[in-house]
Image (spheres, rainbow, N blue to C red):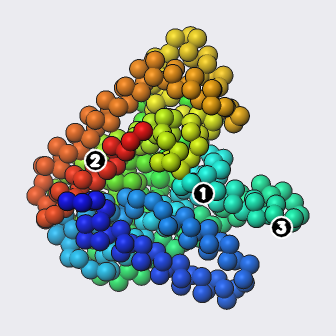
Amino acid sequence: MGSPFDVEDVRPRVQKVLDDVISRQRQLLDGVSEDLDPLVEAVSDLLRGGKRLRPAFCWWGYRGAGGADTESALQAAAALEFLQACALIHDDVMDGSDTRRGMPSAHHRFAMLHRGSAWLGSPEAFGVGAAILLGDMCLSWADEVLLTSGMPTAPLNRAKRVYDEMRTELMAGQYLDLLEQARGGGSVERAMTVVRYKSAKYTIERPLHMGATLAGADDAVLTAYSGYGLPLGEAFQLRDDVLGVFGDPAETGKPAGDDLREGKRTVLIATAMDRATPAQAAELRRRLGDPGLDADGVALLRCVISDTGALAHAEALIESLTDDALTALDSVDLHDPAREVLAGLAYAATRRSV
């Protein structure tokens, strides 16, 4: 098997749905004002990148449960990409991130537009306001794409209940993440709660459940998908946390050590603080969250995280969680080729290079 993202042409088919939706929305917004074009361009640029993880897990959750290959089901899965766009845009505002996928983040992009146009007021406030509205627009489009997918009413209603629960869990996880930053971090357990609700359930478990309910799956399939999706989602986020500190900017699309400058209170950081000597803890507290952290400061914090054993612990946890996910996948009968593709997606999600 080649890339698991391209089996049954899922990735290009999702991209076509996204392009078609954006084209229709552009026509609507052009009828309102030509000044809205920067909003559409910002979404279009953001949605040209990404792994399409959530639509892929939704699709293979659906196909594994016996769902037929239809464009209606594909569109329902693609709706999750607009939800993801909303989450990314708002997350970048909350984190103060200047880049996303190697491009200016939405709020930074609109701040530059304001500044370059010599408009009145604060460029930063304008950028934040525009980004919040853009994220809200993507959230609205996600609902529209799902509900107009053409899926039969009964399975669509079942999937909508999962979708609604997923959105609430996502927002809850986002708030808990904000709370951790405000509190200055805490226990590994609290950091793992953020991981579960902000990322693990939203990225893998709930998309699988959406797909399964669209296909009319029974409780045994849903249970197996949880056994696979939750540990894999946690492993996926832990890998993201490692990449946020040790990753290559060419792979992450963000400057080296950007998570350190933003002061993200991840499981990696919580583990390092838990295991640090007094001197190491002092360095972490002093430098973490410094927006002016230079290359030497990044290198020093990387050394502290490695020397405490936090990096090795994260790598071992990623491996263990991935093994748990694959074991759960073997516990249920799935329609071909879903099992092989889901195993491939597990490796693709967790074995990205640092």
Occupied quadrant, residue 311: top left
Q: Position of residue 122 (x, y in %)?
A: 84, 56
Which of the marked residues, 2 or 3, is nearer the chain's N terminus? 3
Q: Secondary structure at mark 1?
A: strand
Which of the marked residues, 2 or 1, is nearer the chain's N terminus? 1
Q: Position of residue 230 (x, y in %)?
A: 31, 46
Residue found 58% across the figure and 11% down from its top? 279
Q: Is residue 182 left or right of residue 125?
A: left
Judge whether 286 appears above or below 72 on screen.
Answer: above
* Mark 2 and mark 1 residues within 8 Å of each other at the beta carbon: no
In front of the other: label 2 or label 1?
1
Task: Give the residue pinned by disc 1.
Answer: 103
Q: Residue furthest front?
A: 250
Which of the marked residues, 3 or 1, is nearer the chain's N terminus? 1
Which part of the image, by quadrant, shows the N terminus?
Answer: bottom left
Q: Position of residue 325 (x, y in %)?
A: 24, 44
Dot 1 alpha-carbon crowd within 10 angstroms: few under 14, some 14 to 19, many 20 or more = some
Residue found 41% across the figure and 20% down from its top? 309
Q: Position of residue 108 (x, y in %)?
A: 69, 56
Dot 2 alpha-carbon crowd within 10 angstroms: few under 14, some 14 to 19, many 20 or more = some
* Mark 3 and mark 1 residues within 8 Å of each other at the beta carbon: no
Task: Give the residue pinned by disc 2.
Answer: 347
Alpha carbon distance from label 3 to label 1:
20 Å
Residue 121 visible to the viewer: yes
> Which residue type carries mark 1?
Met
Q: Secondary structure at mark 2?
A: helix
Q: Which mark is residue 67?
A: none
